[in-house]
Image (cartoon, rainbow, N blue to C red):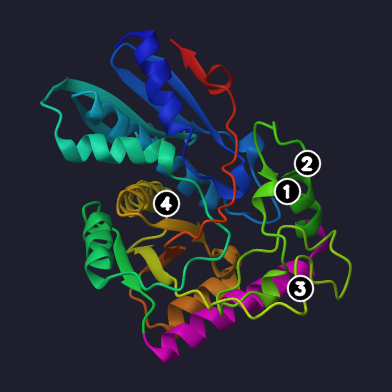
């Protein structure tokens, strides 16, 4: 593989979503191999104390690189945690040969650039069951289980825990300070969450029982409801599908694999015309994560709660990425 090819592949990998758009990854290319490392300097010490979400984010980048390589006609071997003495080395991708490029590989690769996290309300249109079945099959290819939150009892339980976790976070000064550090007012900022990508209205008054993360809670005046017109008719209630991804184990290998499956799911959803955003508050805190596992009678460990639906015309902008030269080195 030439350096120009690896630059292209890593460019695709860095389109992966990451917690607070921290982009906590580093890449080293050598010959036909690419090493993917996590960058502890970009850790979220208040929100993600175990590093689980940081490693899941890197796992998505691993899968985006795999998809981009296959779209070039390469066969790829992925070794997760190849060196126990180097815990930051999460995966090594090795190009092992050539193959004919099929239409599906090209569709998934095209979805890398088309995908971005959508925090705006979705259309009031249900996601077809056959699409959810494909998403479940997609995750299962990596032995990651997928569960649609269906039924009133499950939905009430999950929405309560998401809202409860959001409430806990909003009372944590360390969390609010860290959140503010990753908010960006400059639309050209290479990382973090741009204010323009955050819906103007208070998430607590959205026409949805699924509470998205409130990124500007620390700066919104108490009792204010930005963006609301008291004389306007009520907006339609969105009908998102909410999918839980999980693994049997809960170590670093499982987190990387969960990230890879999440990457595949996001690309499958994008190619099906869907958009997505995470509902990870209930998974941020060990207590609410354990309660979610217990109350939903899960056999395994929840790794991602994902909101899926059809986008409205008023879409939120995509977030920027750091230059490939900042994260890729050649050995």
Q: Is residue 128 left or right of residue 88?
A: left
Frontmost residue, 319 versus 84:
319
Query: Which element carries disc 4, helix, strand or loop?
Result: helix
- Residue that carries the numbered disc 2 in the rendered image: 185
- Residue that carries the numbered disc 1 in the rendered image: 195
Query: For residue 229, which numbered disc appears in the image?
Result: 3
Mark 1 or mark 3, earlier in chain: 1
In the image, residue 33 above or below residue 4 = below
Label 1: few (<14), some (14–19) or many (≥20) C-alpha neighbours in 10 Å: some
Q: Give the residue at x 50% y 87%.
A: 156
Which span is picked out in magenta? 151-174
Mark 2 or mark 3, earlier in chain: 2
Mark nearest the camera among 1 and 3 is 3
Residue 246 at x, y percent in the picture: 37, 64
- Residue that carries the numbered disc 4 in the rendered image: 255
Mark nearest the camera among 4 and 1 is 1
Question: Is any part of residue 63 visible from this angle?
Answer: no
Taking the view exactly as shown, the residue that stands out farthest to the bottom is 153
Q: Could you tell me if the residues under marks 4 and 1 are in contact, i.e. CB atoms within 8 Å?
A: no
Label 4: few (<14), some (14–19) or many (≥20) C-alpha neighbours in 10 Å: many
């Amino acid at each position: 593989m030439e350096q120009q090819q690896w630059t292209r592949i890593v460019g695709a990998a860095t389109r992966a979503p990451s917690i607070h758009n921290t982009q906590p990854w580093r890449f080293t290319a050598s010959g036909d191999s690419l090493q993917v490392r996590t960058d502890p300097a970009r850790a979220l010490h208040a929100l993600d104390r175990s590093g689980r979400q940081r490693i899941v984010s890197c796992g998505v980048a691993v899968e985006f690189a795999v998809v981009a390589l296959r779209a070039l006609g390469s066969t790829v071997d992925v070794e997760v945690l190849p060196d126990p003495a180097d815990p930051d080395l999460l995966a090594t991708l090795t190009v092992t040969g050539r193959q004919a490029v099929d239409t599906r590989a090209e569709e998934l690769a095209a979805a890398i650039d088309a995908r971005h996290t959508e925090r705006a309300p979705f259309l009031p249109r249900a996601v077809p069951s056959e699409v959810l079945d494909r998403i479940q099959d997609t995750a299962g290819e990596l032995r990651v289980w997928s569960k649609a939150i269906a039924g009133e009892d499950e939905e009430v339980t999950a929405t309560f825990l998401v809202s409860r976790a959001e409430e806990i976070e909003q009372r944590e000064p360390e969390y609010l300070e860290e959140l503010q550090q990753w908010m960006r007012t400059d639309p050209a900022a290479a990382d973090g969450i741009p204010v323009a990508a955050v819906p103007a209205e208070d998430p607590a008054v959205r026409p949805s029982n699924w509470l998205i993360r409130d990124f500007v809670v620390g700066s919104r005046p108490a009792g204010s409801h930005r963006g609301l017109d008291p004389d306007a008719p009520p907006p339609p209630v969105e009908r998102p599908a909410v999918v839980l991804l999980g693994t049997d184990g809960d170590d670093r290998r499982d987190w990387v694999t969960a990230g890879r499956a999440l990457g595949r799911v996001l690309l499958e959803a994008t190619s099906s015309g869907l958009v997505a955003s995470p509902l990870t508050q209930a998974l941020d805190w060990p207590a609410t994560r354990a309660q979610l596992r217990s109350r939903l009678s899960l056999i395994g460990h929840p790794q991602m709660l994902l909101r899926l639906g059809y986008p409205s015309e008023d879409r939120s902008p995509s977030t920027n990425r750091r230059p490939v030269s900042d994260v890729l080195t050649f050995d």
